[in-house]
Structures are given as C-alpha cells and as structure tokens.
Image (cartoon, rainbow, N blue to C red):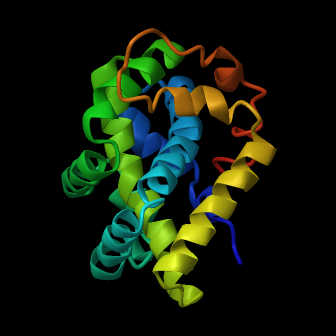
Amino acid sequence: MTGILDLIKSNIGEQALEQVSQQVGGNKEATQRAMAAAIPMLLSALQKNSKSRSGAEALAGALERDHDGGILGNLGSMLGQSKTQSMGEQILGHVLGQRQQNVSNQLGKATGLDSADVGKILANLAPVVMGAVGKVKRENNLGVSGLQDMLKQERKQIKKQQPNLSFLERALDSDGDGDVDLSDVMKQGSGLLSGFFKR
C-alpha cells in the first residue's frame, strides 16, 4: 500500500511551493519548512480524530463524498486558489477544531511566519492531505476499520522517518499553554524536508 506521506511528496513540486509562498509574502524557505512540518502534523491529527469508531466513520464519509484524490494531479493550479483555501478552512475546523490557533502560533514561531500566514498554508494543505488519504482509501477499497489501521500505520512510518514528530504533535495539545520547541524539526536537514518539492 502506498504511504500517504510518500504520495503527497511525489506530487508536490516547485510550482505548488511557489503558489503557496506567494500567498504569504514570497518567503519560499519558510513556506517550505512550514509545509514539511504541517503535512505530517495534519496526518497525525486525522489519526487522533479517527481513533474512535464515530470519528473514523465521519472521516470515511467525508472522504467518499469530497476527496477522491483528484486534487493531487492539479496541485500547481489548485494551490493558492480561494476555492481551495475555503475548502481547507472547513477541513481544518473539523480536523483541528479549537487547536487550530495553537498549531498556527507554534508553527509561526518555528518558521518566522505570521500565524495568519501559517493558517493560509494549513488551509492550502488540508485538501491535499484529505485527497491523498481518500485516494489510498479508494484504491485499496478500505472500510472504516481499514482506514483506522492505515492511518495508524502511516503515523508509525512517519515517526520512523522523523523521530521529532512528538514535537509536532505537542502543538496539537488543545490547552495551548506554553511553547513547543520545533527547532529540531525546522532545521534544513530535517528528515521531513528530504524528498519534498521535486523539480
């Protein structure tokens, strides 16, 4: 089964990075770091939300209705568009809920971006992550339990590739008190960055 993070990596290119960075003042390096951290963070949030049967059923329903993976073939033209961002904001409301501001604040501090700009990056990426999950679910004909298992396995794989995932996940804490040290994750040599943004 294709890994979700690998699927996203293989589809995100320089054009997609350019589209998103233009929305946040053209800082490509900071945008790249924020994207490389935000994608596994969003996957982790989906996995947390789908631990319960009801959460997994809600996610499966959303994937079947709206996220078949078609977005992955059009990232260059889709990212940065108001329609994509609007869809992403709705997804973030479901996936992150009250944690959304804390996640934006923490990623903003780690990358030097304004939290509002991080919010735009997250909104652009949320439909991409959902599209990738939906594509893998559809292609492997996964039911609710299969979806839960896939996301659990994906989180294990990401933790293997990026041991610092626990830093990222701390930003998902709903209380939002105190800072999260994301400096290790944000270093240019971070394992998450390698392989992103194919040319």
Residue 101, position in %: x, y? Answer: 29, 26
Residue 193, position in %: x, y? Answer: 70, 38
Q: Observer-nearest residue: 97 or 19?
A: 97
In this view, 123 is above or below 139: above
Residue at (54, 69) in percent of width and height: 148
Q: Residue most toward the bottom?
A: 141
Q: Residue most toward the top?
A: 178
Q: Observer-nearest residue: 115 or 58?
A: 58
In this view, 140 is above or below 130: below
Taking 121 as reference, is 142 left or right? right
Residue 181 falls in image quadrant: top right
Residue 156, position in %: x, y? Answer: 72, 53
Residue 6, position in %: x, y? Answer: 68, 61
Q: Observer-nearest residue: 66 or 83?
A: 66
Residue 146 falls in image quadrant: bottom right
Q: Is residue 19 in view from this perspective?
A: yes
Residue at (48, 59) in percent of width and height: 51
Taking 174 as reference, is 199 left or right? right
Taking 197 as reference, is 52 left or right? left
Q: Is residue 199 in view from this perspective?
A: no
Q: Quadrant of the N terminus?
A: bottom right
Taking 44 as reference, is 115 left or right? left
Q: How many marks?
A: 0
Residue at (23, 57) in percent of width and height: 87
